[in-house]
Image (tube, rainbow, N blue to C red):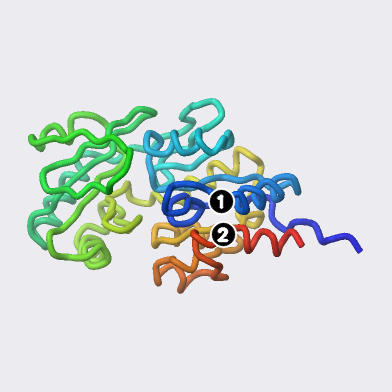
């Protein structure tokens, strides 16, 4: 008896904490499972909160040449052609107003920002804690420098509030102006209102002639919630944030233990 056909035409995977292990690599088992899914007729789209400049080198190392949704849905990037297909920027006036309102509520923030474009720099202000790694940043002192060129997002940190508390307070204060998401440990982002991984993924899927009903999505953080809401089936990693697990259709093994491969191998029979 032949195995049942693979039930999805699109496999959407988050990057950090999902497809990537802690050392920024993808296991052979997961590579093989994704290759088998694509051989069975499914497309694979990486959907990440990272902007293109912080994603491109990883995609190149992986040999990934398809579409990638970057910048929390704001950028659709063709990895094979190294070309930005769509880009949504953050209204800097609105972002500045949102920042001032949040600070009036919770006190001074440490701030960073991601500039728009294929080579957009990440600007880091005083006191902002940057995760260790190879990703380049540019320090700034003068706040005016932050707003001097188009931005895809702004990052905020608080000296005392944790990520969830800061995001919750920010949403309560400026939720009608911008979106605020927790994208990873120490990563709280201010985004254009209405922008999410779901909006970016729907654009990328449409380019491939695919729909939400064709899609299985994997993720680990609250910024993946809209993507799970859009996709037919949402799978949270064992290491996922509790908010994402609460809305997931399924929970798999962690990113360190081939959680994507576990699900795909089962579906592939």
Q: Alpha-carbon neighbours of circle 1 within 10 Å: few (<14), some, or many (≥20)?
A: some
- What is the secondary structure assignment of the residue under circle 2? loop
Mark 1 element type = loop
Mark 2 crowd level (few <14, some 14–19, many ≥20, 10 Å Cα) = many
Which tag, 2 or 1, sits closer to the chain's start? 1
Please name the residue that numbered disc 1 is placed on.
27
Q: Quadrant of residue 57?
A: top left
Residue at image coords 13%, 64%: 160
Can you say which quadrant of the picture contains the C terminus? bottom right
Residue occupying the point 40% across, 72% down: 242
Give how far apart the Cα atoms at labels 2 and 1 are.
7 Å
The reply to whether dot 2 and dot 1 touch (C-beta < 8 Å) is: yes
Dot 2 corresponds to which residue?
A: 258
Residue 124 location, quadrant? top left
Q: Camera-side residue: 145 or 139?
A: 139
Query: Is 133 or 90 nearer to us in this picture?
Result: 133
Residue 114, position as x, y percentages in the image: 28, 38
Q: Position of residue 152 (x, y in %)?
A: 32, 39
């Amino acid at each position: 008896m032949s195995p049942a056909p693979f039930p999805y035409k699109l496999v959407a995977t988050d990057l950090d904490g999902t497809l990537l292990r802690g050392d920024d690599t993808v296991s052979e088992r997961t590579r093989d499972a994704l290759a088998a899914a694509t051989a069975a007729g499914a497309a694979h789209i990486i959907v990440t909160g990272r902007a293109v400049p912080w994603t491109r080198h990883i995609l190149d190392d992986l040999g990934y040449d398809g579409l990638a949704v970057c910048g929390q849905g704001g950028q659709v990037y063709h990895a094979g052609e190294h070309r930005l297909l769509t880009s949504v920027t953050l209204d800097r006036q609105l972002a500045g107003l949102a920042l001032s309102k949040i600070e009036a509520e919770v006190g001074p923030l440490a701030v960073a920002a991601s500039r728009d474009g294929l080579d957009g720099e990440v600007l880091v202000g005083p006191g902002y804690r940057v995760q260790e790694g190879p990703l380049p940043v540019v320090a700034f002192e003068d706040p005016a420098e932050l707003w001097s060129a188009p931005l895809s997002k702004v990052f905020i940190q608080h000296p005392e509030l944790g990520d969830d508390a800061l995001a919750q307070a920010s949403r309560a204060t400026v939720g009608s102006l911008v979106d605020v998401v927790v994208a990873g440990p120490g990563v709280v982002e201010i985004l254009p209102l209405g922008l999410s991984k779901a909006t970016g993924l729907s654009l990328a899927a449409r380019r491939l002639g695919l729909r939400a009903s064709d899609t299985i999505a994997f993720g680990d953080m609250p910024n993946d919630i809209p993507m799970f809401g859009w996709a037919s089936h949402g799978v949270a990693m064992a290491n996922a944030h509790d908010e994402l697990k609460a809305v997931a259709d399924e929970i798999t093994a962690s990113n360190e233990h081939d959680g994507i491969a576990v699900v795909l191998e089962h579906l592939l029979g």
